[in-house]
Structure formats: structure tokens, C-alpha cells
Amino acid sequence: MLKKSWVGLAAAALVLAGCANNASQTASGGSSSGGPGDKVSIMVGGLNKQIYLPFMLAQRLGYYKDQGLDVTLQDEGAGVDATTDMVAGKVDGVGGFYDHTIAMQGLGQQLESVVSMLTTPGEVELCRNEVKDQIHSPADWKGHNLGITDVGSSTDFLTQFLAQKNGVDPASTHRVGVQSGATLIGAMQHGNVDCAMTTEPTVSTLLATGDAYVLLDMRTAAGTAKQLGGEYPATSLYMTTDYVTKHPDIVQKLVNAYVKTLKWIQDHTGADVAAQMPADYYAGSGKDAYVKAFDSEKGIYNPTGIMPPNGPSTNLKVLQAFNPDVKGKSIDLSKTYTDKFVQAAK
């Protein structure tokens, strides 16, 4: 299939940046913490996904307000599109996978993670039951339709890497953007994709209906190391280096809220989490399944917010294996993240 070019995305973002509103202005249609305070807008690559739980949870717990922030959270089905909007100046930050900071540096764009929220991707590759006799591992993916959130997304990165690692040319697969939740479930149930990479609560929903089986699981450190070769820091808050440099006070307040949220997660159960979240966050899978999913994968959350020391090199290795925007490029990983705000929060 034709791959959406990160070069094209970056170029489009730069054009849009010239006419975008000031990044400190919040866009309509988002979820705001309300009240007076420093305004900041964050676009999240799937607010109801458990891998992005800290963003909404911080709001529900009142931690943004405690820091004197008026935060608007906007939902976007894929991190690649959220990244483009941020570079264009439409939002201040992105709740997405850390690996986008590496991919964009390969294109000359400086982004950095300011707090690490997940130490593993929390991703699961599901396949529909009708192909159970055909697909036993990624080595069987040739010629099959593979669901990802969107072309150029982190699930696209991981899918291509897993294909290549298992001897399959990514170009011989058909990667289809199906986002997550209801759209991904529909694509699986109607046979539009044979396998798809997704997270909770979508995983539990498909397994509960008996429509899919687990091909591989990266919700644990062991499962991640088996598939990717080491730690793979995933969810983070990342921003342009320019924004971080110009607004260190706002960044520090955000990180304070997220470090406190990550600590809250460690001290509470799935039932506690579900009680805080909007009911529609677990409407598809049901509250019991949502609670069970959280309790089973609680270990994905970073208890400190510090970037895992050996993680960035694994992310880089994955991207260098297939991504032309990164392969052969000189990437300075020290510029793709900073721990100084987390250390100050502690």
C-alpha cells in the first residue's frame, strides 16, 4: 500500500503553522478542566484508550486545577495526525507514543517528551478467528490486511518492524488505518482486516465476543522484550522543543500533575479508576471488563515518569529497521526527551 509520508506531513504542518492560531489558544470541541489558569491544549491519540489514561484521569482528579492550569483535551484517533496538528501550532502538546519524537527529528523537527507514562506499548495484535489456521505469527502476514490506527502511526511503526523481523517485507502487507474502538471492531467483524494492533479496552471487547484471538501481546515487559528486543517507552506528553523552551513554567505544572497521576494509578485498582472515568469510556466492553483489563495490565504504567534509561535506544532500533525518515540518519536521542521536569516534580 502507499505509505503516508512523514515528509509530506511535516511540510504540511509547516505551511499550516504560518496561519494557525496561537498555540496557547484552545480549540473548540475538547474537554476542558475549566476555570481560570494558564491555558494549554493537548491532543491525545485516543482519549478512551487505557494506554492514554493519565491525561483524562488527571483532569477527573482535579490535578490540572490544582496546578493553576486550564487544560483542554482533544481526541484524535492517531498520534501521527496529532503530531502534525501540534507542529502546525494548533495545539500545545500531544499525548502519544514517544517514538514520534525520533521520527520527526529525522525530518529536522525538534520535539521532546517531558514525561514518560508507559514503559511498554500496551499493544496487542489480534486476528479474527476465521484466519486462525492461516496466521500463526507475523511470519504469515504476507498478502494480508493488517489494521493500524493510521498510516505513519506508532502502530504502523510496530507492525512494519514485526513484519520485517519475521521475514516479511512490510510492502507485501496491506496496512489499513482503522483507528481503534468501534471502527477497528467493525473492520475485524466485517473481514476488512485479518489482524489489527490495538489496546484496552478494545482488546477485551473483541475477546469477549469471541471474534478474535491474540497473536502477540506487548502488555508486559517480558512480552515487549520478546517482540522488540528491550524496553519500549510508549505513551508520553511530548511538545515542540520551542514550546518547552518558551513555557517552562507551564510544562512544569503539567508534569507535576502527571507525576501525581502516575503515583495515584500505582495506589489504586481498576474499580477505583473506572469510578473516576466517564461511563462512555467503558461502554463497549462493559465496566467489569474495563476493570479487569486495567488490573491485568497495570504494570504498563511508569510509576515515576522518568524515561527508562535503555528505552530510547530500543525505539531507535525499531525505527531504523524500516523507516526511511530515520534509517541512516544521525539521531541525537538526548534531544528527544528530558527528565528535568519530572525530577523537579519529585
Image (cartoon, rainbow, N blue to C red):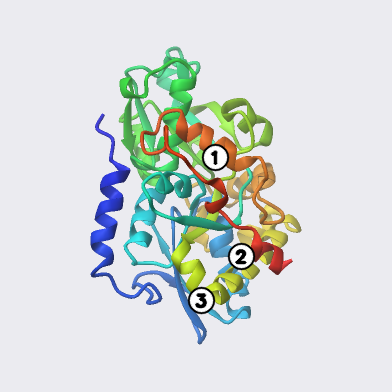
Please name the residue that numbered disc 2 is placed on. Answer: 276
- Please, what is the three-letter code of the amino acid marked with disc 1? Ser
Q: Give whichever of discs 1 and 3 has the lower sequence position.
A: 3
> Measured from the top left, where is residue 244 in percent x and y?
51, 67
Tell me the quarter of the image containing the C terminus: bottom right
Judging depth in this view, the residue of 336 and 296 nearest the camera is 336
**Rendered residue at 37%/44% (across/down):** 179
- Compute the Cα span from label 2 to label 1: 20 Å
Q: Residue at x 47, y 45 (%)?
A: 102
Q: CA distance from mark 3 to mark 2?
A: 14 Å
Q: Is residue 120 visible?
A: no
Q: Tell me the element at label 3.
A: loop
**Residue under circle 3?**
33
Asked if 280 appears above or below 22 in the picture, the reply is above
Tell me the number on the disc at residue 204: 1
Q: Is residue 280 left or right of residue 176?
A: right
First in sequence: mark 3 or mark 2?
3
Please state if 261 lies on the left or on the right of 189 as rendered. right
C-alpha separation, residue under disc 1 versus residue under disc 3: 29 Å
Q: What kind of element bears circle 2? A: helix
| Mark 1 nearby-residue class (10 Å; few <14, some 14–19, many ≥20) | some
